[in-house]
Image (tube, rainbow, N blue to C red):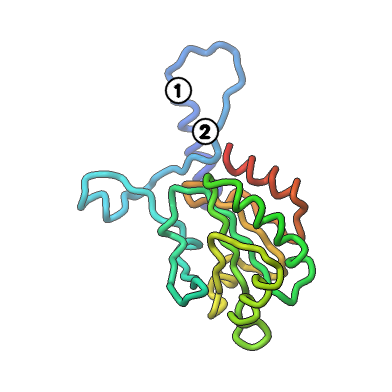
């Protein structure tokens, strides 16, 4: 509560310090611009202010060949994360929509993250599903230890998370998406 009060006071002070001529228009407050209260250590070393990578991107997933991939390596590109499993009927029904959009655009990275627990869901089951369905994805990934699922607080699948080029989560959709819903969410992500 105290942080909220401090942020509100700072906002009032900053808005009141505007030196532009009052034209009677209503003031606007930009809510998505962070107020920097401390400079990160990297500023002192390099002489520039660098944004820190959001913690939700500091997670590791694995390609089907076992290669580790860290989501923070992709800051600068919009990302769609889709959490799914082969045993989940709504997940399976929406997969063709993701495959279609994944093949149609290079402006967004689609990371299909399978919740691979090693028992109910295995890398072999994922490959069998892909072979049987004929679907292909540029980035079919495995969450082998559940860290990504925990970091994004996934409580049900399918869940789709939309992350902008700065690494900020702009939307999360729980449940199956139609092709049109997915397209609209990707358009919003690119705006």
What residue is drawn where x is 79% and y is 70%? Answer: 89
Looking at the image, the residue that sits furthest to the bottom is 119
> Which residue lies under the disc numbered 2?
12
> Which residue lies under the disc numbered 1?
18
What residue is drawn where x is 65% and y is 57%? Answer: 99
Q: Can you say which quadrant of the picture contains the C terminus?
A: top right
Considering depth in this image, is 4 or 131 the residue closer to the camera? 131
Between circles 1 and 2, the one closer to the viewer is 1
What residue is drawn where x is 59% and y is 55%? Answer: 80
What residue is drawn where x is 53% and y is 80%? Answer: 145
Query: Where residue 175 appears, x then y in whole percent?
Result: 76, 61
Q: Residues within 10 Å of mark 2 (few under 14, many from 20)?
A: few
Q: Is residue 43 left or right of residue 181?
A: left
Please report whichever mark, 1 or 2, sits nearer to the chain's N-terminal start.
2
Query: Where residue 44 appears, x then y in whole percent?
Result: 22, 51
How far apart marks 1 and 2 lie (CA) works out to 11 Å
- Whether tag 1 and tag 2 are in contact, CB under 8 A, the answer is no
Identify whether 144 is placed above or below 163. Answer: below
């Amino acid at each position: 509560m105290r942080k909220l009060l401090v942020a509100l006071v700072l906002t009032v002070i900053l808005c009141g310090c505007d030196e532009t001529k009052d034209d009677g228009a209503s003031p606007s407050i930009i809510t998505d611009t962070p107020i920097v209260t401390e400079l990160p250590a990297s500023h002192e070393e390099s002489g520039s202010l660098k944004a820190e990578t959001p913690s939700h991107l500091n997670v590791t997933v694995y390609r089907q060949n076992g290669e580790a991939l860290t989501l923070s390596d992709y800051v600068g590109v919009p990302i769609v994360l889709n959490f799914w499993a082969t045993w989940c009927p709504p997940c399976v029904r929406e997969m063709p929509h993701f495959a279609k959009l994944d093949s149609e655009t290079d402006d967004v990275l689609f990371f299909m993250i399978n919740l691979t627990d090693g028992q109910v869901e295995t890398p072999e089951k994922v490959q069998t599903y892909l072979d049987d369905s004929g679907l292909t994805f540029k980035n079919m990934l495995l969450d082998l230890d559940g860290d990504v699922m925990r970091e994004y607080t996934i409580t049900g699948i399918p869940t789709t998370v939309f992350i902008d080029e700065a690494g900020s989560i702009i939307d999360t959709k729980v449940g199956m998406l139609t092709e049109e819903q997915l397209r609209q969410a990707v358009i919003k992500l690119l705006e």
